[in-house]
Amino acid sequence: MDLAFATAARTTPAPDLIIANDPDADRCAAAVKVGPGNDDWRMLRGDEVGALLAAHLVKRGARGTFAESIVSSSLLGRIAEKAGLPYEETLTGFKWIARVDGLRYGYEEALGYCVDPEGVRDKDGITAALLLTELASELKEQGRTFLDLLDDLALEHGLHATDQLSVRVEDLSLIADAMRRLREQPPTELAGLPVTKAEDLTRGTDTLPPTDGLRYTLDGARVIVRPSGTEPKLKCYLEVVVPVAARADLPAARARATDLLAAIKRDLSAAAGI
């Protein structure tokens, strides 16, 4: 199992769970054993960990603003809305999340979580790992796991599935060309889903300052495209939301989400010429 951390990452093992903290990058992640009596593990995505921490904080009665970067899952907004809590989106990076007034919880999909802004107003893997451990302990007492809680959130808010299309280039002009192509000829649909809103984020929005990026809102999905700020990459953040009526419908919803994400990647790649 690849935890995507350096070998120096500190881990807390349990028979069915590993929680890992990378102290060099202040990141936290978790992996869960899938089913009893086997050695199959599933690494939780950053957005999944973000939702688990948010749900746990809500249950503990947290008050204040829940915030995330625009490239993170919209599930956080739905959790906050259901709990009657303020919610804000920011540009990418904790330098933006940390500026949110009244911040109580903030996260970014790249495994960064701020769960104790009064103590550390930045991403902090140690406090996030501790809170995950507390949640895991409570769930274990109920005979449940992180995966069960994620299922609960999918039933309550819809299945939110995320993925990335990341393209590394040798020639940076290819990134500029792709962004120009998408601005001049924005897609009208992706994976058969109509694009209901196309935003050029260089103009800013009512809540966001200008940044080099594009955001497409689709019927049941969302795409954000931006050049990486640290690597020679074009990064595309994809999310689909599939309604789930009953627990028995979850496998079909996951299959549908997987198919949609793959199709969006294909169509977006074609539209950007990458």
Image (spheres, rainbow, N blue to C red):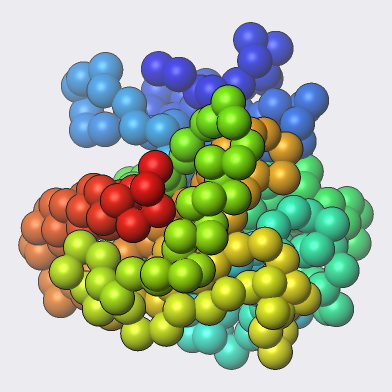
Vertical placement of residue 252 versus 156, above or below: above
Res 107 → quadrant? bottom right
Question: What residue do we see at 64% from left, 10% from top?
Answer: 7
Foreground residue among 113 and 210: 210
Q: Which image quadrant: the N terminus?
A: top left
Q: 263 left or right of 126?
A: left
- Please identify the residue farthest to the right as the structure is shown: 119
| Count of number-bearing discs | 0
Res 69 → quadrant? bottom right
- Please identify the residue farthest to the top as the structure is shown: 7
Residue 7 seen in the figure: yes
Q: Which image quadrant: the C terminus?
A: top left
Vertical placement of residue 253 versus 39, above or below: below
Question: What residue do we see at 47% from left, 40% from top?
Answer: 166
Q: Where is residue 249 in the image (x, y as percent from the top left)?
A: 10, 64
Q: Where is residue 218 in the image (x, y as percent from the top left)?
A: 33, 76
Q: Where is residue 269 in the image (x, y as percent from the top left)?
A: 34, 48
Residue 110 seen in the figure: no
Q: 206 left or right of 260?
A: right
Res 196 → quadrant? bottom left
Question: What residue do we see at 40% from left, 69% from top?
Answer: 185
Q: Position of residue 26 (x, y in %)?
A: 76, 36
Foreground residue among 24 and 266: 266
Question: What residue do we see at 69% from left, 79% from top?
Answer: 203
